[in-house]
Image: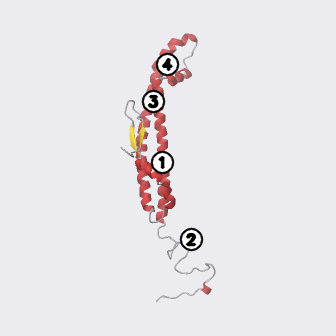
Amino acid sequence: MEGLKTLMVPRGLPNLAPLTLDMTLIYEAENRLFEVSLANPSNAAQLQGYFNNACNLTTKYLAWIEYEILNAKKHFDLAKATVILEKSIEEWNKIKSSGVKYNEDFREAMVSRDSDCQLRLDTLNALIASKSLLESKVKSFTRAYYTCQSVSSSRGNSAGSSRIGGNIGQTFDEPQANFMGSYDNVSVKDEE
C-alpha cells in the first residue's frame, strides 16, 4: 500500500512470519512533535488527544514485542541447552585426547559457534532493539501530552483576562495593597 510505513519485527517463536506493525500514526505523531512549541489554549486539547492516541498505539506494540521477547528468550535457552547437553559432549568426545577440558568455557564456546543459537540470539537482540526504539517514542509522546495538558489547563489565564491568578505581578479585578505603591493615588468606585 502506498504511503504505509511499517516496522517488521521478528517473532520469538522460530519459523513464524515477522510481525508487521503499521507505524503510520506513530511517524506522523513524531513529525508533529514540533507543534508542542506552538501549542496554545485553543489547540492544546486537540494535540493532547493526538499524542495520547499515538502513545496508546505505541504501548500496544510494546506489549506485543515484550511477548515476542519472552518467547525468543525461551527458545534461545532451549537451543543453548541442546548444545550444552548434546552437541558439546559429542564434540568434546572427539577432541578430549588433545587435552581440552570439558568446562564452562568449552560449553560457552560451543554455544557461541552454534548456528541455531546465533540465529535465536540475533532474533532476541532485534526484538530488544525494537523495544528500545518504541520506548523512546512513548517517552516523547508522553512529554508532548503533558506539555499540551499544561497549556490546556492554563485556559483563561491569558494576559487579556481581568483575573489571571494569584501570583506576584499578576493583575486582579481590584487593586492590591502595596502593589506598586498604595491605594493613596487610586480611586475605587463603589458599584451600587
> Mark 2 and mark 3: span between their CA atoms?
60 Å
Could you say which disc has been placed on residue 120 in the image? Answer: 3
Q: Nearer the viewer, mark 3 or mark 4?
A: 3
Q: Secondary structure at mark 2?
A: loop
Position above or below: 15 against 7 = above
Single out the residue that lies furthest toward the bottom: 192
Image position of 62 with respect to 85: above or below = below
Q: CA distance from mark 2 to mark 1?
A: 35 Å
Q: Which residue is mark 2?
A: 167
* Residue 118 percent location from the top left of the image: 48, 27
For the question of whether residue 55 can be seen, the reply is: no
Q: Position of residue 95 (x, y in %)?
A: 53, 12
* Residue 126 place in picture, x, y as percent: 47, 36
Question: Which residue is the site of mark 4?
Answer: 88
Which circle's residue, 2 or 1, is located before the other in the chain? 1
Circles 3, 4 touching at the beta carbon (< 8 Å): no
Amino acid under label 4? Ser
* Residue type (three-letter) at the residue carrying disc 1: Lys
Q: Going from the N terminus, do you reach mark 2 or mark 3 first?
A: 3
> Element type at marker 4?
helix
Which mark is on residue 137? 1
Q: How far is the residue under mark 1 from the one under mark 4?
A: 43 Å
* Viewer-nearest residue: 49 or 102: 49
Name which residue type carries label 3. Answer: Arg
Tag nearer the camera, 1 or 3: 1
Q: Are marks 2 and 1 in contact (CB under 8 Å)?
A: no
Relative side of 33 to 100, left or right: left
Q: Amino acid at mark 2?
A: Asn
Question: In the image shown, does 77 or 1 lie closer to the viewer?
Answer: 1
Q: Nearer the viewer, mark 1 or mark 4?
A: 1
| Furthest residue toward right | 181
